[in-house]
Image (tube, rainbow, N blue to C red):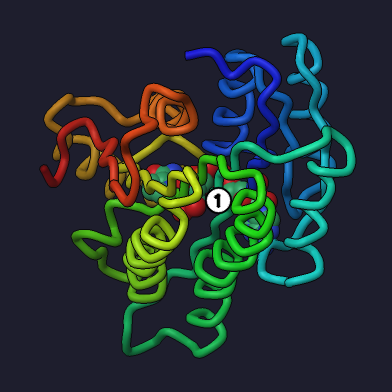
């Protein structure tokens, strides 16, 4: 799966799953724009990428803001000369039971996951349509398929990403732009470390493969969807869950 010289943008790339995706893309030869709200962590990942022998560019972005999201995509074009791959991974949780969830908690989650993905896909699509090639991968969640208590906002946003992926896939197929989604299960990052230990253990016990997922498990699926090994796949949703909720 060679991605030599390909130019990738990854959002939420400063830590967790996005960091691992960025490093794994770089290991396969891609130059990566590391987009994150947190510039320090983005700079750190960009340095790790350079050590792997490809180019890394840290970019501070709030994907939920149009100018910022468009600036991220433009940075890839201006600095590296194009854009082949976009991975929409930035995400937040603002958990609360439905009867207690505030309007702000709802709006924030929708803004980062859905509006952020919309804006980045839109800016990327304008370029990719002209170039007649490209790969877009949206990081949804298995919560978007099965729901999750305390996550009406998050599960809704992640289900929404599936619809957005399929609509964009239909629009862009004739331009040889593939748009697919990945639905991770329970993955070991800061996001899930915030879950109380007792609940974590219950969730892990429900995984047929009997272990929590690692960010690399997700990065492998993403790199596949960014490679020419998946050229005839578009509008797909890959579940990477260790068999949970099959
Ligand atoms: P994380 O919390 O470790 O990292 C998220 C990153 O996104 C952070 O670096 C953060 O600064 C960045 N970010 C947040 N808001 C942003 C914004 N407005 N603009 C740009 N960057 C922003 O999370 P993790 O676990 O690595 O999750 C990555 C993605 O995978 C998220 O979309 C998450 O919903 C999804 N996911 C994670 C699962 C898990 O078990 N950890 C399971 C299913 C999906």
Q: Can residue 194 be seen at all in this image of the molecule?
A: no
Q: Quadrant of the C terminus?
A: top left
Q: In the orientation shown, which residue stands out farthest toward the right?
A: 79
The answer to whether residue 107 is above or below residue 80 is: below
Query: Image check: 236 left or right of 244?
Result: right
Residue drawn at the location 88% of the way across and 37% of the way down = 79
The residue closer to the viewer here, 110 or 164, is 164
Q: Secondary structure at mark 1?
A: strand
Cβ of mark 1 under 8 A from ligand 1: yes
- Quarter of the rendering containing residue 182: top left
Residue 180, placed above or below residue 108: above
Q: Residues within 10 Å of mark 1 (few under 14, many from 20)?
A: many
Seen at 26% across and 68% down, the residue is: 149
From the top left corner, tell me how far across and down residue 7 is, in percent: 70, 31
Is 239 in front, or is 135?
Answer: 135
Q: Is residue 66 left or right of residue 241?
A: right
- Residue linked to disc 1: 88
Q: Horizontal and vertical percent for residue 107?
A: 54, 82
Image spot of residue 39 (x, y percent): 83, 46
- The location of residue 63, given as percent across then percent down, is 68, 62
């Amino acid at each position: 799966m060679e991605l030599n010289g390909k130019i990738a943008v990854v959002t939420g790339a400063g830590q967790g799953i996005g960091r691992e995706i960025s490093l794994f893309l770089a290991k396969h030869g891609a130059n990566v724009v590391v987009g994150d709200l947190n510039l320090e962590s983005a700079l750190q990942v960009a340095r790790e990428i350079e050590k792997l022998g490809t180019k890394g560019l840290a970019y501070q972005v709030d994907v939920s803001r149009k100018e910022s999201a468009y600036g991220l995509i433009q940075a890839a074009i201006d600095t590296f000369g194009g854009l082949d791959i976009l991975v929409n991974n930035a995400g937040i949780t603002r958990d609360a039971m439905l009867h207690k969830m505030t309007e702000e908690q709802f709006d924030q989650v929708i803004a980062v996951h859905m509006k952020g993905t919309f804006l980045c896909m839109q800016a990327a699509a304008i370029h990719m349509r002209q170039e007649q090639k490209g790969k877009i991968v949206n990081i949804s969640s298995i919560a978007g398929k099965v729901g999750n208590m305390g996550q009406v906002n998050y599960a809704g946003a992640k289900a929404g990403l599936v619809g957005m992926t399929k609509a964009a896939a239909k629009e862009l197929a004739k331009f040889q732009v593939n748009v697919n989604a990945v639905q991770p299960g329970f993955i070991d990052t800061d996001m899930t470390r915030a879950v109380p230990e007792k609940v974590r253990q219950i969730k892990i016990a429900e995984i047929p493969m009997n272990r929590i997922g690692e960010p690399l498990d997700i990065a492998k699926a993403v790199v596949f969807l960014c490679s020419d090994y998946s050229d005839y796949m578009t509008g797909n949703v890959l579940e990477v869950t260790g068999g949970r909720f099959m």
